[in-house]
Amino acid sequence: MDAQKVDMFMMMNAKYFESHHLNAVREKLLTLDESKWGLVQTMQFKEPSTALIISIVGGGALGIDRFFIGDTGMGIGKLLTCGGLGIWTIIDWFLIMGATREKNMETFQNTFY
C-alpha cells in the first residue's frame, strides 16, 4: 500500500491505539494489498475519551462503559455488582481508555490477520 496513505491513516487514527501498537499497525498497513484500502477506510474505532466520559458520568456503575467498547462479559459483571460496589467503577476510570485502545487493536487484528 502507498506509504503516504498509510501515514495519513496513522495521523488520523493514532489516538485509537496504544503507542506500542502503532508500529505494528503501520507495518501491517504497508503490507496490505491496494484492494483492501476501502476496508481500511471504513473501519470504525471506539473513542477512548468517550468511554471515559461514559464511565465518569454514571455509566461506569452499570457497566455501560464496558458495553460501549464491546466488553460484554465485564459489562454484565459490573451491572450485576453495581460496579463492584463502586470500587470497580473507580478503577475503570483509570483503565477504560487503555481498554478501549486494546479493543480497537483487537478489531484491527481481527480484520486483517
Image (cartoon, rainbow, N blue to C red):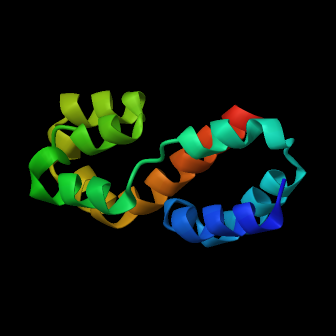
Q: Residue at x 82, y 43 (%)?
A: 34
Can residue 106 be spotted in the picture? Answer: no
In this image, 103 relative to 64: left or right? right
Give x and y (percent) for residue 1.
84, 53
Q: Residue at x 16, y 38 (%)?
A: 62
Which of 64/7 is in front? 7
Q: How many marks?
A: 0
| Relative height, residue 17 to residue 111 (above, below) | below
Within the image, what quadrant is residue 5 found in?
bottom right
In this image, 111 relative to 61: left or right? right
Can residue 89 be spotted in the picture? Answer: yes
Which of 13/36 is in front? 36
Q: Residue at x 55, y 52 (%)?
A: 102
In this image, 42 relative to 20: left or right? left
Q: Residue at x 75, y 68 (%)?
A: 4
Give x and y (percent) for residue 13.
54, 62
Within the image, what quadrant is residue 35 found in?
top right
| Relative height, residue 11 to residue 75 (above, below) | below
**On-image quarter of the C terminus:** top right
Give x and y (percent) for residue 22.
69, 66
Which of 53/61 is in front? 53
